[in-house]
């Protein structure tokens, strides 16, 4: 192989590798930024029921009806709508313990001090496709949280 061809191929490989590293770095920054926006306590009231969702690092805790589900979560803010997977590690009651070891596929949107979150039952493979519009019935657990005041 001629030295010019070899140099050209090596240059192309280096350029492609550095472009990939830049893209991967940008994706990590976007995830970190979105994850930071989720951190803290979120609360919601649906009828007489109060829901609390806490994000701390890559961990979550959802509290409702005197029970809680906690575990780890991952997000993909590059998707539209944003995607979130919650792996339930621990449940504190009959309604949540049955989901231990299962993942809830959900979508979410953070808009200032509001978190719109729509989740399928843990263990189901389907992910919701869109947040419901005003007055539209959601397929799954849909909660609009407010950021708790510090």
Image (tube, rainbow, N blue to C red):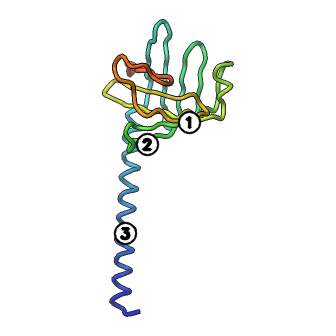
Q: Which residue is mark 3?
A: 16
Label 1 with label 3: CB-CB less than 8 Å: no
User: Which circle marks residue 72 in the picture?
Assistant: 1
The quarter in which the N terminus is drawn is: bottom left
Where does the image place residue 41, in percent across and percent down from the top left? 45, 23
Q: Camera-side residue: 50 or 117? A: 117
Q: Which residue is found at the position 35% from the left and 23% from the top?
A: 133
Label 2: state its secondary structure: strand
Q: Position of residue 112 (x, y in %)?
A: 31, 27
Q: Quadrant of the C terminus?
A: top left
Q: CA distance from mark 2 to mark 3?
A: 24 Å
Q: Quadrant of residue 98?
A: top right
Instruction: Check if mark 2's residue and mark 3's residue have beta carbons within 8 Å.
Output: no
Which of discs 1 and 3 lies nearer the camera? The answer is 3
Between the C-alphas of marks 1 and 2, the distance is: 14 Å
Q: Residue at x 35, y 59 (%)?
A: 22
Name the residue rendered at 36%, 30% in the picture. 110
Callout 1 touching callout 2 (CB < 8 Å):
no
**From mark 1 to mark 3, how far is it between C-alphas?**
34 Å
Q: Nearer the viewer, residue 44 or 58?
A: 44
- Looking at the picture, how far across and down is residue 50, in whole percent? 49, 12
């Amino acid at each position: 192989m001629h030295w010019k061809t070899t140099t050209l191929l090596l240059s192309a490989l280096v350029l492609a590798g550095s472009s990939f590293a830049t893209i991967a770095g940008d994706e990590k920054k976007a995830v970190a930024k979105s994850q930071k926006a989720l951190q803290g306590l979120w609360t919601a009231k649906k009828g007489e029921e109060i829901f609390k969702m806490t994000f701390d690092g890559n961990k979550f805790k959802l509290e409702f009806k005197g029970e809680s589900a906690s575990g780890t979560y991952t997000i993909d803010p590059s998707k539209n709508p944003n995607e979130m997977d919650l792996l339930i590690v621990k449940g504190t009651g009959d309604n949540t313990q049955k989901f231990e070891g299962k993942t809830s596929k959900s979508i979410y949107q953070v808009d200032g001090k509001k978190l719109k979150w729509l989740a399928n039952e843990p263990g189901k493979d389907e992910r919701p496709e869109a947040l419901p519009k005003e007055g539209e019935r959601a397929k799954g657990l849909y909660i609009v949280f407010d950021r708790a005041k510090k």
